[in-house]
């Protein structure tokens, strides 16, 4: 699993607002579901080097202004999901079309 896949998986864990929380890493929500913050969602799928790389990809989108946990706690669910979307988009390869490699004489 690469960084992009880790972020896609983490995003899917918290895509439903009932699965997301603030001010703690993880808890049982009012509906009985397990809720996670953004950073905990990333940690659920990886550790070590991959955790560092996935965290850096998100951190780049915050522009180093605050930690992932702090961003999670001070922004709306919509903004946190948008953060993941921006990071995933930057990690998504752009398809190359044939005409880009056409040589002209």
Image (tube, rainbow, N blue to C red):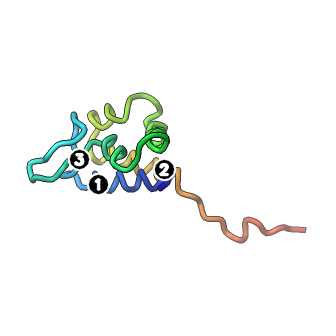
Say above or below: 74 vs 101: above
> Residue 53 at x, y = what percent?
49, 42
Q: Nearer the viewer, residue 38 or 50?
A: 50
Task: Label 2: state its secondary structure.
Answer: helix
The residue tagged 1 is 15
The residue tagged 2 is 3
**Is residue 13 visible in the rendered structure shown here?**
yes
**Residue that extends furthest to the top in the rendered view of this protein:** 65
Q: Residues within 10 Å of mark 1 (few under 14, many from 20)?
A: some
> Residue 87 at x, y = what percent?
46, 47
> Residue 61 at x, y = what percent?
46, 40
Q: Residues within 10 Å of mark 3 (few under 14, many from 20)?
A: many
Q: Residue at x 42, y 28 (%)?
A: 65
The residue tagged 3 is 20
Task: Label 3: state its secondary structure.
Answer: loop
Q: Residues within 10 Å of mark 2 (few under 14, many from 20)?
A: many
Q: Residue at x 13, y 47 (%)?
A: 29
Asked where in the image residue 37 lies, by quadrant, the reply is top left
Q: Is residue 103 left or right of residue 2?
A: right
> Residue 84 at x, y = what percent?
40, 48
**Is residue 61 visible in the rendered structure shown here?**
no
Single out the mark in the foreground, 2 or 3. 2
Among the two numbered marks 1 and 3 on one chain, the one whose residue lies closer to the N terminus = 1
Q: Residue at x 45, y 40 (%)?
A: 48
Task: Label 1: state its secondary structure.
Answer: loop
Among the two numbered marks 1 and 2 on one chain, the one whose residue lies closer to the N terminus = 2
Asked where in the image residue 26 lies, by quadrant, the reply is top left
């Amino acid at each position: 699993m690469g960084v992009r896949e880790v972020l896609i998986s983490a995003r899917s864990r918290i895509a439903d607002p009932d699965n997301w929380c603030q001010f703690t890493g993880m808890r049982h929500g009012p509906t009985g579901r397990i809720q996670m913050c953004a950073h905990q969602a990333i940690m659920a799928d990886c550790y070590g080097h991959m955790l560092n790389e996935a965290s850096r990809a998100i951190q780049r989108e915050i522009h180093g202004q605050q930690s992932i946990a702090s961003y999670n706690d001070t922004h709306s669910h919509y903004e946190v999901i948008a953060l993941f979307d921006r990071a995933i988009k930057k990690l998504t390869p752009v398809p190359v079309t044939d005409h880009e490699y056409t040589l002209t004489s």
